Amino acid sequence: MTKNNTRTTPIRTAILEILSKIKKPLTTQEILCALDKKNINANKTTVYRQLESLKKNHLVNEVHFNDRNTRYEINEEGSHHHHLVCIKCKKVDDISLPEDLHDQEKIVLKKNNFKVLQHYLEFFGLCKNCHK
C-alpha cells in the first residue's frame, strides 16, 4: 500500500518512479514511452486509470499548458510551484513565487464570492538558450 492507502502495482510504482526521475510534467504518451523503455507493457487505458487513481489520491498533479495536452507530475507535499515553458525548445522549469497566491484566492472569495479550489499559473516564453 502507498501512503494514501492505494494498492501498489508494478505499473503504478513505475509511473511514480518515472515522474520522480524526469522532474518535468509528462503527457500520457510520454509516460507510455518511458514504460516501454523500462520493458513494462501497459496499454493506454491502464495508464489513464492509474494516473486518475494517483491524482485522486493526491500523489500526482495534472498540469495544463496551452497545447491541450494534459501532463502529470509528482505531487511533492508543501511544494506548490508554477512552470516556465519555452515555446521554442519545449523546456519546462519549475518556479516558486515568493508571494503566496493564497492571499489572492482570499480576495477572489471576498470580492466575487468564489471559492478557489485549485489554480494553475504557467509562464510561456523563451528560455535563456532560445532568446540569444
Image (spheres, helix red, strand yellow):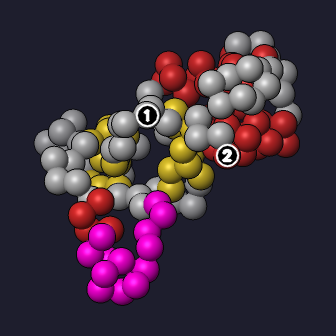
Residue under label 2: 56
Between 73 and 92, the one nearer to me in the picture: 73
Q: Is residue 53 above or below residue 104?
A: above
- Residue type, numbered disc 2: Lys
On the picture, is 66 further left or further right than 112? right
Residue 89, how many percent across, how many down? 37, 41
Q: Earlier in the sequence, mark 2 or mark 1?
A: 2
Image point (29%, 60%), residue name:
102
Task: Identify the image quadrant of the N terminus.
Answer: top right
Image point (37%, 36%), residue name:
78
Task: Identify the image quadrant of the C terminus.
Answer: top left
Q: Is residue 105 above or below residue 58?
A: below
Range drawn in magenta: 106-118
Q: Quadrant of residue 5?
A: top right
Residue 13, how many percent across, how many down? 69, 19
Q: Is residue 27 visible?
A: no
Image point (54%, 44%), residue name:
61
Q: How many marks?
A: 2
SS at mark 2? helix
Between 99 and 24, the one nearer to me in the picture: 99
Residue 75, how many percent across, how many down? 50, 36
SS at mark 1? loop
Q: Quadrant of residue 125?
A: bottom left
Between 115 and 12, the one nearer to me in the picture: 115
Q: Is residue 48 visible?
A: yes
Is 49 part of what is drawn in magenta? no
The numbered mark at residue 77 is 1
- Residue type, numbered disc 1: Glu
The numbered mark at residue 88 is none
Q: Report, in whole angstroms, how far the alpha carbon at label 2 lies from the one at label 1.
A: 15 Å
Determine the residue located farthest toward the bottom in the rendered image: 112
